[in-house]
Structure formats: C-alpha cells, structure tokens
Amino acid sequence: MESPNILTQDKKYEGFTLIEILIAVGILAIILSFGLILSMDFYKTYAFNYEKDLIVGLLQKARSQSMANIYESNYGITFNSIDHQYILIKGLSVDQVFEANKSIDITWPEDVVFNQLEGKCQTCDSSDIEIILSGLGKTGTITINNEGRINY
C-alpha cells in the first residue's frame, strides 16, 4: 500500500496568491492616504493657531510691559510685511524681532502702541484695530480696542 505524499499536497496551499497580495496592498494604500490627508489638515490648523497665538502673546507682552512702565517707555508691536517679521517696539526703538509664518497672509493696518501705566491702546483712537490672518484654509481676526483689550 502506497502512502500519500503529504509534502506534495501541502505545497499546493503554501503562501499567498497574487490577488490576495494586491488586495492587501490596495487596502493599505487607502488607509495611508486617509492618514496623510488628516495629518496635513492637523498641521495646517496647528501652524495657523501657532501664528495667532504668537501675535496675541506679543500684544499681551507689549501691553504688560507698558503697564509695568519698564524702562519708563511705551511698548508696541508692528508688522514688517517686506521681511515678514513682528517687531516689538520700546519707545521709538526696536526691542525684539520675531519671524512670521510666510504661508499666512497678515493684514496689519497700523502699529499697536500701549500707554505707560494704563495699558490703553495709544494708536487706536476711537476705533478698534483689526489684525486679520488668512491662509492655510483658515481665517482669523484679532481686535484691539482703545482700552487695550485684545480679543481673538
């Protein structure tokens, strides 16, 4: 009696077929493309929020330094659209310079200067100053009123 060749029968079922491999690679490609799309949206939101928070932080720093009367001077912020930089102003001189994100368009109508000890916006007069950020599929507004309040 001849015994069946077990090795020959098992080799017939070893490994994956080409169709199974192609389906697995296709599913993996779809999952990775969704992940890439979601991560790009996350990056854009992060970059936009970072820029907005940077401007608000600089405005708050200028206002607090004016209220604290550091070096007995007014402090303010201006935006250099040519070099794409935020400039912290102390009196009539430059105190610090911060780089802005070039992917975001910024509409900065005028310098924002805060009064010593009071923290009121010296350059606001009777109307509010609106700083508008747009880019990366998002838009945001930062408003400074004549009392020095920063709304964002």
Image (cartoon, rainbow, N blue to C red):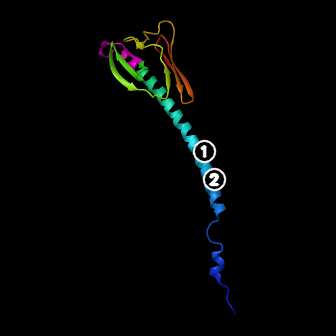
Q: Residue at x 66, y 78 (%)?
A: 9
Secondary structure of the residue carrying tag 2 is helix
For the magenta stretch, what is the residue range?
Answer: 61-78
From what the image shows, is residue 27 above or below residue 119?
A: below
Q: Amino acid at mark 2?
A: Ile
In percent of width and height, residue 78 lies at 41, 17
Q: Which quarter of the rendered picture does the N terminus lie within?
A: bottom right
Residue 91 image-quadrant placement: top left
Return the residue at label 1.
Answer: 34
In percent of width and height, residue 113 lies at 41, 13
Secondary structure of the residue carrying tag 1 is helix
Q: As rendered, which of 150 and 67 lies closer to the eye?
A: 150
Return the residue at label 2.
Answer: 27
* Residue farthest toward the bottom in the current orientation of the protein: 1
Q: As rendered, which of 43 and 150 lies closer to the eye?
A: 43
From what the image shows, is residue 18 above or below residue 38?
A: below
Q: As rendered, which of 66 and 142 lies closer to the eye?
A: 142
Q: CA distance from mark 2 to mark 1?
A: 11 Å
In percent of width and height, residue 146 lies at 48, 10
